[in-house]
Image (cartoon, rainbow, N blue to C red):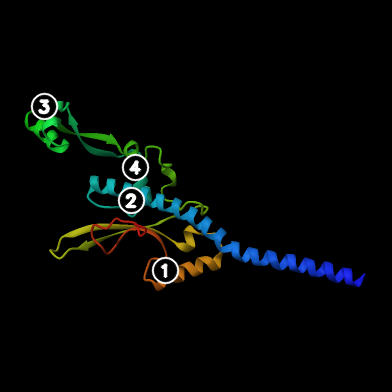
């Protein structure tokens, strides 16, 4: 009887140790799968913020560091769009590349360009996102992106507005394995990279790229 009990106990121990080994292998894989999902959702949100900021600047000549202002602009503002009115004859396309053909048609008075106002919401959103969620980091229970603006002076003393929107690893991966987040943050910090996702820059001119690009 004692022998049977020992055998059962050893079998249970082997199963338990096997599970522990399997779990230790799968844990970083599960973390990476969840982190990748957060990464893609957060990246798209930052792209949406960038689109809104670029449109805001095209209207007001500056960026905003206030989400209320930015969301109100997207919801109620208008954008100036240059449209070509008229049809370019096929004969022009047979002679010239598309852009040259359009220019020639304008010079001939066949086509004219006009500036029209279109609703900002229709132009920017187009069903891509819910406006009220613009400020929120996805899947974090209401955490808000950091949003800031600044002015940078060029070598020729011209003042250029810049903006930055970002979410730290601790924020956009909130709720995932803590040690894995710490490891990722340490790795990025040691490589002099921002430990998270961001778009734009407060120190570089004309750099609205995301740090994933």
Q: How far is the residue under mark 3 from the one under mark 1?
A: 56 Å
- Identity of the residue drawn at 29% across and 62% down: 202
When the figure is inspected, residue 10 is found, relative to residue 201, above or below; the finding is: below
* Label 2 crowd bin: few (<14), some (14–19), many (20+), radius 10 Å: many
Foreground label between 3 and 2: 3
- Identity of the residue drawn at 16% across and 33% down: 114
When the figure is inspected, residue 88 is found, relative to residue 206, above or below; the finding is: above
Which residue was labeled with disc 2? 50
Secondary structure found at label 4? helix
Residue occupying the far right of the picture: 1
Circles 2, 4 touching at the beta carbon (< 8 Å): no
Which residue was labeled with disc 4? 74
Q: How far is the residue under mark 3 from the one under mark 2?
A: 37 Å
At which x and y percent is residue 30? 57, 58
Foreground label between 2 and 4: 2
Residue situated in front as seen by the camera: 72 or 96: 96
Foreground label between 1 and 2: 1
Residue situated in front as seen by the camera: 204 or 78: 204
Which residue was labeled with disc 1? 188
In terms of sequence position, does the residue under pointer 3 or pointer 4 come before the other? 4
Q: How far is the residue under mark 3 from the one under mark 4?
A: 34 Å
Secondary structure found at label 3? loop
Foreground label between 3 and 4: 3
- Identity of the residue drawn at 17% across and 28% down: 85
Which residue was labeled with disc 3? 110
Secondary structure found at label 1? helix
At which x and y percent is residue 163? 30, 57
At which x and y percent is residue 139? 51, 52
In terms of sequence position, does the residue under pointer 2 or pointer 4 come before the other? 2
In terms of sequence position, does the residue under pointer 1 or pointer 2 come before the other? 2
Q: How far is the residue under mark 1 from the one under mark 4?
A: 34 Å
């Amino acid at each position: 009887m004692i022998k049977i009990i020992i055998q059962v106990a050893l079998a249970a121990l082997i199963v338990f140790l096997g599970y522990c080994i399997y779990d230790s292998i799968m844990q970083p894989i599960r973390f990476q799968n969840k982190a990748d999902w957060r990464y893609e959702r957060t990246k798209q949100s930052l792209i949406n913020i960038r689109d809104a900021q670029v449109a805001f600047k095209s209207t007001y000549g500056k960026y905003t560091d206030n989400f209320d202002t930015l969301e109100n602009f997207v919801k109620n503002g208008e954008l100036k769009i240059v449209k070509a009115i008229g049809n370019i004859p096929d004969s022009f396309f047979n002679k010239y590349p598309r852009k040259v053909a359009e220019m020639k048609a304008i010079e001939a008075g066949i086509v004219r360009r006009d500036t029209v106002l279109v609703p900002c919401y229709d132009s920017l959103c187009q069903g891509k996102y819910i406006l009220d969620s613009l400020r929120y980091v996805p899947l974090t229970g209401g955490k808000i992106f950091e949003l800031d603006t600044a002015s940078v002076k060029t070598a020729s003393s011209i003042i250029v507005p810049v903006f930055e929107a970002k979410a730290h690893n601790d924020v956009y991966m909130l709720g995932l394995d803590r040690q894995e987040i710490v490891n990722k943050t340490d790795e990025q910090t040691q490589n002099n990279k921002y430990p998270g996702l961001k778009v734009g820059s407060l120190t570089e001119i004309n750099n609205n790229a995301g740090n994933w690009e």
